[in-house]
Amino acid sequence: MINLKTKGGQKLLAAGNWVWSLFTINFAWFLINFSVILTAIILGSLDFNVTFVVINLILTFMLAIFTIPSLMASFATVQDWQINGNASYFKKQFINWIDMLKNYKLNIGFAFVFGILIFLNKWFFGNVFPHMFILTSTVIVMAILITMSFQVGTKSEQSFTELCLEYPMRILGATLIFIALLVLNLVLQLAFLIVICSISLSVYFTYRMFGGRVEKND
């Protein structure tokens, strides 16, 4: 039996609390976006037809309501975690998501762009050069979204432009982390990661890479 009063036991307890904080943030994000994930799965199975267009419009609306603001909320919640220490942030993530709905112009704007990219990706699927251009554009938009989500979610004193100029390689790195964890979910079929840690871990790494406030080390 492990003695939690020892130095090793305290480290193990701290690690467990850290993982719990990470999980509660991610699980709340997952519940917020569960319907979005199901809709995306359905959309991916459809051929390019009227049904695809209609479902894509529905997905675009859902991205504006759920996915974009909940990503911004994740940065706000991770900041709370890094300032206040390990705890359950399940409820806080929902509160922050509701708060981020007020950024409706950003939410709708990003959702609209992603909706168009999804449409074009399906339309040009199989055509190498147009398809590669769309995929590259998607990565760029993701990088912009991640940076903007950090800036808005943490209420950073640095503007979006300042972040881009100061951390270009870190923005690229953060985007690659997000993509890598998505690939683990989709390609390697490790779907449980999206429930446990995919988004919150990506946000955590991005937050630290961008120099977010850290005042509590558990």
Image: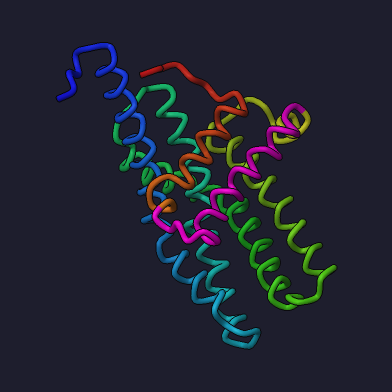
Observer-nearest of 191 and 84? 191
Tell whether 175 sits left or right of 27.
right
Measuring 81% from the left and 62% from the top, which residue is drawn there? 133
| Quarter the C terminus occupies | top left
**6 is within the stretch colored magenta:** no
Measuring 54% from the left and 69% from the top, which residue is drawn there? 59
Compared to 167, does 64 lie above or below? below
Compared to 50, does 167 lie above or below? above
Q: Residue furthest bottom?
A: 50
How far across and how far down the image is residue 10, in percent?
27, 17
Measuring 42% from the left and 29% from the top, which residue is drawn there? 80
How far across and how far down the image is residue 203, in percent?
52, 39
Compared to 171, does 136 lie above or below? below
Which stretch appears magenta?
166-192
Observer-nearest of 99 and 86? 86
- Report the number of numbered marks: 0
